[in-house]
Image (cartoon, grey):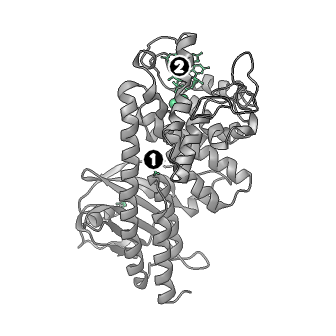
Amino acid sequence: MLDEKQKLFQIIDLGHEIAQVKDVDILLERILTIARQFVNADAGSIYIKEDNRLKFSYTQNDTLQNKLPTGHKLIYSTFSIPVNNESISGYVAGNGTMLNIEDVYKIPDNVPYSFNKGYDEISGYRTKSMLTFPMTTTRDQVIGVLQLINAKDRDGNILSFVKEDEPFVKHFANNAAIAIERAQLTRAIILRMIKMAELRDPKETGAHVNRVAAYSIEIYEKWALGRGIPVDEIEKNKDIMRIAGMLHDVGKVAISDVILKKPGKLDADEYEIMKQHTFLGARLFTDQYSDFDEASSLVALNHHERWDGNGYPGYINPFTGHPIVGYQLKEGKVPGKKGEDIPAFGRIVAIADVYDALSCKRVYKEPWDEDRVLETLKSERGKQFDPEMIDAFFDSLDIIKSVSSRYPE
Ligand code: C2E
Ligand code: SIN
Ligand code: SIN
Ligand code: SIN
Ligand code: FE
Ligand code: FE
């Protein structure tokens, strides 16, 4: 057991750790993982305030997780509840105070809030102890709620959350609030950038880019775990991938309306111009200040390369548009990059982008039914797509489908 001073240092460190995370989805995952470890909670959830409601935004549950086959993720659906005194998290958000409840099935009648057993009834889980904190920014605004469920001892017996931990969790929840606010701003700025492209290209919606990015991190994680990449590195790369994935088509801002908005099939010349969105996008990240810029540039450049070498724009310098020295033109054209010459992030986004493009309506096409989409992806294994990445895609399909329902058109 850590003493108070060690705990204080630890919680400060953990605050620094979450301050590094840029993407809001990745951040919620980190916050909950860290907070649960700190108090040894079996489960937990994060609610984010939107308008005057709390949106159930992320959850973890070791007991339910352990019932799943290894490598499978817990699938949950989002819902929202009003900020009022009736629910536990609604009370905490509305009053800005924490609640440390020993057993949510034994809440006395003289308090306004009650526990909704409906969730337990669906999942078969028994929620008992619950520590619920508001996440409060420096401007005293509650941006959400951190809820930790079922504190455990070493043998897995359920205990109450100890009073001594409350100040640490409070400190951490408030650090989390600041980090979430910043990540929400980053997400909003990126979506605004994409909206500028969308004004010109109505089908590249915020929902599309969110889905492509979210699928990409699932594929990446599955692939990277299979390759034995260290978990720290995976976490960092997921954050980078989430942001770079959203920006894959940002080069379309530079393509003329006539081509972008053409309701029918592009002719060969138009398609040649369209292909430039790859390196034009990459050029937007010329000043590579961070890993995020570098990855965004690589993803924009490489998301239409094909594993078999028949993709585009191929071995060019994105800044000049000229072939990279040493690559011979093939029938007057720059050859496509092949296999592992294509950066991993590009190989991943290629799959996520086509999966989404085929599944959805476009100005130039109707949505395909799911079987046809999946058959097409499978048949392109080792041709258009990296075979290992396609396997990772199919291994993550259940979570990918649940992600897709979080970002409807
Ligand atoms: P996008 O709509 O985001 O599509 C991304 C990729 O999904 C396409 O890259 C392609 O690999 C795949 N895809 C989309 N629809 C189909 C389809 O019906 N069949 C097959 N087999 N694959 C499909 P691609 O082809 O390099 O296109 C890049 C971008 O160029 C597209 O992005 C879209 O913005 C534009 N584009 C491509 N073809 C047309 C077209 O016929 N008309 C119009 N207006 N735009 C097109
Ligand atoms: C909560 O309110 O914090 C959880 C949902 C409920 O049981 O009321
Ligand atoms: C094309 O040949 O225009 C690309 C295929 C498609 O996106 O429909
Ligand atoms: C960021 O670095 O967080 C913004 C995304 C980018 O410019 O790469
Ligand atoms: Fe593209
Ligand atoms: Fe796209």
User: Which quadrant: the N terminus?
Assistant: bottom right
Q: Is mark 1 within 8 Å of ligand 2?
A: no
Residue under the point 44% across and 18% down? 363
Give residue 355's quadrant in the image.
Answer: top right
Secondary structure, mark 2, is: helix
Left or right, 262 with reference to 320: left
Which sits in the foreground, 382 or 147? 382
Q: Viewer-nearest of labels 1 and 2?
A: 2
Which residue is identified by label 2? Answer: 273
Tell me the number on the disc at residue 128: none
Q: Where residue 252 sits: x, y (%)?
A: 46, 28
Label whose residue precedes the other's in the sequence (1 or 2): 1
42 to 199, vertically: above or below: below
Looking at numbered disc 2 in the image, what kind of residue is underneath it? Ile
Give residue 327's quadrant in the image.
Answer: top right
Looking at numbered disc 1 in the image, what kind of residue is underneath it? Ser
Q: Residues within 10 Å of mark 1 (few under 14, many from 20)?
A: few
266 to 169, vertically: above or below: above
129 to 125, vertically: above or below: below
